[in-house]
Amino acid sequence: MSYTTLLTTLENGILIIVINRPDKLNALNKDVFIDLNTVLDEIEKNAEIKSVIITGAGPKAFVAGADISEFNALSKQEAMALAKRGQDTFARIENSSKPIVGAVNGFALGGGCELAMSCHFRVASENAKFGQPEVNLGLIPGYGGTQRLVQLIGKGKAMELLMSAHMIDAAEAKQLGLVNYVTTPETLLEHTKKILDIINSKAPLAVAGCIKGVNAVFDETKDGYALEVEEFGNTFATEDMKEGTAAFLEKRKANFRGK
Ligand code: COA
């Protein structure tokens, strides 16, 4: 599969997606959203893809935001459609049954911070910078930033960052729980791949059940405890559950097949 704005490589079951507009600090324009939706279709369909890393091209930026050059002439209705498209795309990332991790290699601002937050978790390099600078432009986040930032770092700090446009560095992002690990720029991808190698060795349907359960916490339309009961039950109807429990009892390594 080839894309206009993305580079992709599949290694050991891990699909690495690089947002590739380095001369514009990987800003998210219309074409990036088209490509992201196409790659999300591919992730769902392709059984060789077990998990995914999203990162940015070049040494400077993960994604420096939505492409501001597409904003200027928009009407209110068009702006709402743009926000909805962004939210729908990021909801697909968040609800992917396969783990998607953000490897944040530089500026993650505005839509870039929102993209990173839609991933299941994040690893950052030391030079990463996070922020929602929309108020500098006279607007607010439109791709879920006012919601997910609160979920990840709490109301008070989210309010401050959103209202002040203040940028935080990787160390502060880790302290706030926005990222799980901080690495050197050189080791960012290796470190992220190591985490995914571990996750990829687990039962894929059980991993997908964990994603569903955790996401239900933040979905008012769902009863997370009831969903957990159902997902727990579902795992008992899988071959992998029989294999995992048998392997434990036989003191051998389980061989999961995602069935
Ligand atoms: N949309 C469109 N273009 C962007 C962009 C964005 N969000 N962010 C950066 N670019 C472009 C710049 O216009 C510039 O293009 P040019 O070389 O054709 O002029 C190029 O990327 C490099 O950016 P530049 O601003 O020269 O780099 P810098 O190192 O001086 O500053 C930032 C880096 C991230 C601080 C600065 O680019 C910035 O503030 N970007 C916008 C961040 C933002 O407000 N995001 C939220 C959008 S809703």
Image: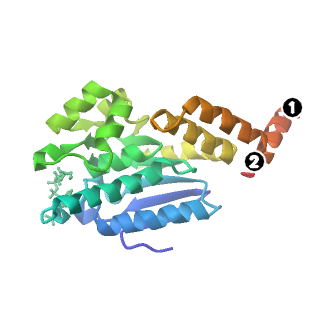
* Residue located 30% across and 30% down the image: 172
- In depth, the one of 143 and 32 nearer the eye is 143
Report which quarter residue 21 is drawn in: bottom left
* Residue located 46% across and 52% down the image: 93
Report which quarter residue 224 is drawn in: top right
- Position of 2 with respect to 209 (left or right) is left
- Category of crowding for the residue at label 1, using alpha-carbon neighbours closer than 10 angstroms: few (below 14), some (14–19), many (at least 20): few
Identify the residue position indicated by label 2 in the image.
256
Identify the residue position indicated by label 1 in the image.
249
- In depth, the one of 16 and 115 nearer the eye is 115
Rendered location of residue 153, percent (x, y): 34, 30
Q: How far, Cα to Cα, is label 1 from label 2? A: 15 Å
Rendered location of residue 194, percent (x, y): 56, 44
- Category of crowding for the residue at label 2, using alpha-carbon neighbours closer than 10 angstroms: few (below 14), some (14–19), many (at least 20): some
- Position of 166 with respect to 128 (left or right) is left
Q: Residue furthest right?
A: 250
- In depth, the one of 116 and 124 nearer the eye is 116
Q: Residue furthest top?
A: 156
* Residue located 57% across and 60% down the image: 44
* Sequence order check, earlier mark of 1 and 2: 1
Provide the secondary structure element on which disc 1 rests: helix
Image height of 218 relative to 18, above or below: above
Under mark 2, the amino acid is Phe
Report which quarter residue 11 is drawn in: bottom right
The quadrant of the picture showing ligand 1 is: bottom left
